[in-house]
Amino acid sequence: MAKKKRLLIIDSNSLVHRAFHALPPMSTPKGEMVNAVYGFMLAFFKAINEFQPDYIAATFDHHAPTNREKKFKEYKAKRKKAPDELYGQIPKIKEILIAFHVPVFEKAGFEADDIIGTIAKLAPQRQAVPPLETIILSGDMDLLQLVDKQTKVQAMRKGIKDSVLFDKKKVQERFGVGPELVADWKGLRGDPSDNIPGVAGVGEKTATHLLFLLGSLESVYSALKAKEDIPGVSPKLRETLLKEKDIAFLSKELATIDREVPIDFSLPDLLWQGFSTKEVEKVLLNFGFRTLASRIPEIGEKKENQEVSKEDELTQKLKHLYEEGVLSEEVYEMEQELTPVLRMMEETGILIDKKFFKKLSGELAKNLQKLEVGIIKKAGITFNINSPKQLSEVLFEKMGLSSRGLHKTPGGVISTASGELEKLKDASPIASEVLKYRELAKLQNTYVTPLPRLADKEGRVHTSFDQLGAATGRLSSANPNLQNIPLQGNWGKKIRCGFVSKKGFSLVSFDYSQVELRIASHIAGEEKMQEVFLQGRDIHQETAAVVFGVKDMEVTEEMRFRAKALNFGILYGMGARGFSQSAGISYQEAEDFIENYFAKFPHIARYMQDTIESTRELGYAQTLFGRKRYLPDIQSSTPHIRAAAERVAINHPIQGFQADIIKMAMVRIAKELKLQQEDCRMLLQIHDELLFEIRDDIVEKRAKDIASLMEKVVVLKVPLIVTIKAGKNWGVQKSIL
């Protein structure tokens, strides 16, 4: 019999809170608080050694308001807000988890518990062979309702070292009912820690007694409605139970973990094959964790190989995906050929101008200081702009701004998240200035300050590519993420100017022009769109002319803007509401526009409907090259979950095919041009774009060769067009050829 595989899911937020309050203050050499980080890692090391997982995932709460808060505004309202020193440690924990190659999950509107429940439910269904055992590591008891034959919860009792493994028997001992009735139990008893009310006067013993006798909350109320004689239920208790029926069922709903969160993963995504000891050690030592760094080998040794190379990690993951049918043979072979290409790119890195970034950092600091002075002047009080709580107090208590229509945080504070501040821009200029301040602070802290520190002695920054970073097949980049360098705006352009070519060379970018629209016209067989591309005309202007019923020369900039927003939005399954927001028009106008769009481009509409139907029938969407994406949520009975899966189904054949195309181009370019030779080296892939460093005297020749290979990598009903730009830095480039 095959050995049972094991999945470890980490309830990160609960561990962070427990560690923060269990350990005394600890600081990095730079003075940053890290006691929660240290405690979290102690629990992580212990769990890895104890359970030896084959698969692993870490989940976090999202900062956005949850669906439970929207349904019951008092949910968790009495819970004291944790200090900023705690929340400031969460990004550090994520940084360490990434170094350990642990995938991280979070989702707006949902708690970590919901994501855990969804992964625990779906993972065994996603062709796990042999059978899968799931261990959930948590700092509280909320997850015990997930315990079943194959799922256990390792819950902590005191501090971070004292824990107990809950199976069905232990859950029964703790609550007096099985895991399947834990939410019913909380429906009656309530949960003070989450401010779930329950029925007044019903304690643990009464809740257990009722469920032991009758089996579920529904059965309890059926018996009450039928006026049955229930042992141990006094007339007063009966009256209270009937009076608070709605509260009981609301409490059960709040306590019930949502196991249908629309998250996207396949079981191979969670495969844990090891990590780079050097990479992890570097991160741990940066936080001053010398003792933890010295313990790294104990994890590595138990993984049978202390330091697994990226290739050996990837080889097994690719093989797993191929055997599961996620990758076709053609895509599987291409991904294998791409691996050494990416390793060469990582090793090469990209040169940055450290002096430029130092100067830019000073400019940003001056602008931030100027904004800070202006904000404090308008507020009439000195406060920490980076503190959401203090900002909320200033805006809504001191300045008296209206909070109507704004969300609250779990601690009951009026939210000052960017989305909420956008709603206040017209009411008070201070909101706009805070948004500008945050934007500049993010650029400073995410790019301008860290990048020079990450450069090697030659001034080159080396990212890490994950060729299976997304289910569509798109590459992702981390440590640092060089696919997310800002493109728009004055400051974004300035940051790109800090990426430079070495002396005697130029940075040359090759960008597929409107590739996803070209793919959509090919797949859908939309002849009107194909004709535009074949004749080299402006697709957005043509779309506007067709939909608005005017001549090309009569299309205004506003018309073209709306057509462009819809052209790209359609590929992501965008509806009228999303289109009205992106185009700045009314909902009714958006509905009319979309209806007219589909009338003029019926093959696009038919493609969308056919794709949804085939995905519902097969259980997956796939690209023309056979890269599958399983979407069980498309069968969900919950409308918003089903709709999200339908949008993914529409997009995957297009975006996934685009990912296949550029990956194939990278492989072909590397083969035929024999990269990475000193005179021409591929540095980065940014989804539709490839960035090269090419010797000045051969730029034109190499550019022609590379563009030709990219344009001819596949044959579509419309041409693939590559635009080429070159310059001494990434921010200032001119079209060539």
Image: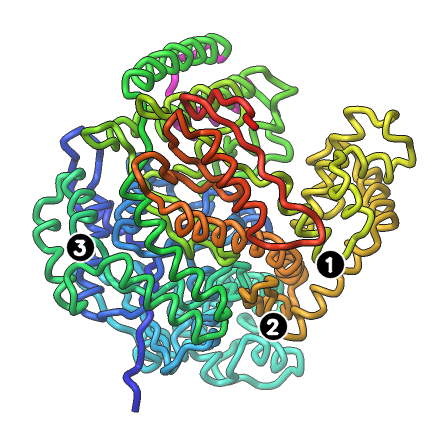
The secondary structure type at the circle numbered 1 is: helix
Tag 2 residue: 619
Residue for point 35% across, 56% down: 339
Q: Position of residue 444 (x, y in %)?
A: 37, 23
- Classed neighbour count for the residue bearing mark 3: other residues with Cα under 10 Å, few (<14), some (14–19), many (≥20): some
- Classed neighbour count for the residue bearing mark 2: other residues with Cα under 10 Å, few (<14), some (14–19), many (≥20): some
Mark 2: which amino acid? Gly
Dot placed on the residue nearer the N-terminal end, 3 or 1: 3
In this image, 342 relative to 640: left or right?
left
Residue for point 43% across, 76% down: 323
Mark 3–mark 1 distance (CA, rounded to whole Å): 49 Å
Residue for point 38% across, 12% down: 363
- Indicate whether 298 appears above or below 225: above
* Residue sitting nearer the eye, 442 or 403: 442
Mark 1: which amino acid? Met
Question: Is residue 714 found inside the magenta-colored segment of the image?
Answer: no
Say how many tags the image has.
Answer: 3
Give the magenta range: 379-399
Q: Position of residue 536 (x, y in %)?
A: 73, 37
Q: Position of residue 273 (x, y in %)?
A: 27, 64
**Which is in the foreground here, disc 3 or disc 1?**
1
In this image, 537 relative to 378: left or right?
right
Q: Quadrant of residue 447?
A: top left
Which numbered disc covers residue 42?
Answer: 3
Dot placed on the residue nearer the N-terminal end, 2 or 3: 3
* Residue sitting nearer the eye, 320 or 427: 320
Tag 1 residue: 608
On-image quarter of the C terminus: top right
